[in-house]
Image (spheres, helix red, strand yellow):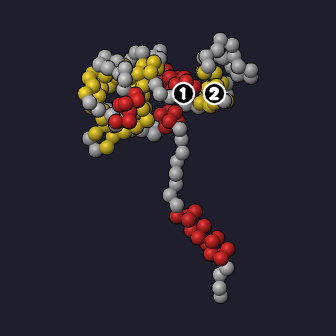
Amino acid sequence: MRLRPSGIALCLTAIAVFVAPSVHAGDVLSRLTSGHQYSLALGTVVSISDATVRFEVETIISGKTLPSVINVEIPDEWVVSNAQGLGPGNHAVFSLKKEAARYTIAWGFFRVSSLDMGTLEIIESTLPPGDVAALQRYINSEGTETDFFFIGTTAYVRRPDGTSKQLYPPTDEPAEGMSSSD
């Protein structure tokens, strides 16, 4: 019995679908707020030399525990575009991955205004403004608010009670059909 070319193609397609590895999609914001890194840490830059940042860890926002001071290797592509303006004494949030005993950047680092998680502001980032507002809300909520959504470039957070709050652009008035309560 001879298989027709369409039968062979169907069999090969079925095999490819069942054998192909899974791919997980997600943007940087979802990776930062959903634990897709070893640790998301808030702290102070102690020193910078070449492609290494010595970082004093104040608080773990999410992920695994870290030593009180770590050296973070910054890949060349991050140094050129992101590390300008990051210096000793600056406060920052680092998304970290750990490979053996090395810490490197997972999804970025963000200069922030203080070490107070409830009130800090992100003051330097390469993320779009709506993503920055959502990440800041995530940090300010100590990692509890994670249900962000966007309509166009407008960013919102959805609360467990079903209400939503517009995060970006900031507004003093509630969006239609949305609650503005904090």
Assign a secondary structure to mark 1.
loop
Apparent side of residue 137 relative to residue 163 in the rendered image (left or right): left
Amino acid on which the number 1 mark rests in the picture: Pro
From where the camera sits, is residue 59 visible? no
In this rendering, is residue 70 above or below 2? Answer: above
Amino acid, disc 2: Thr
Question: Mark on residue 38?
Answer: none
- Within 10 angstroms of label 2, few (less than 14), some, or many (20 or more) residues? few
| Residue farthest top in this picture | 172
Image quadrant of residue 64? Answer: top left
The residue shown at (65%, 85%) is 2
The circle drawn on residue 153 is 2
**Percent coordinates x, y for residue 23 in the rendering:** 52, 51
Of 71 and 80, nearer the camera is 80
* Contact between labelled residues 1 and 2, with CB atoms less than 8 Å apart: yes
Residue 108 placement: quadrant: top left
Left or right: 88 as drawn, with respect to 106? left
**Residue placed furthest toward the front:** 80
Q: Earlier in the sequence, mark 2 or mark 1?
A: 1
Q: Residue at x 32, y 20 (%)?
A: 87
Where residue 135 appears, as percent x and y from the top left, is 51, 26
Q: In x, y percent, where is residue 22?
A: 52, 54
Q: Residue at x 33, y 34 (%)?
A: 74
- Can residue 78 be seen by looking at this rendering? yes
How many numbered badges does the structure rendering display?
A: 2
Percent of width and height locating residue 42:
38, 24
Q: Secondary structure at mark 2?
A: loop
**Disc 1 target residue:** 128
- Can you say which quadrant of the picture contains the N terminus? bottom right
How far separated are the C-alphas under marks 2 and 1? 9 Å
Residue at point 35%, 31% (across, down): 79
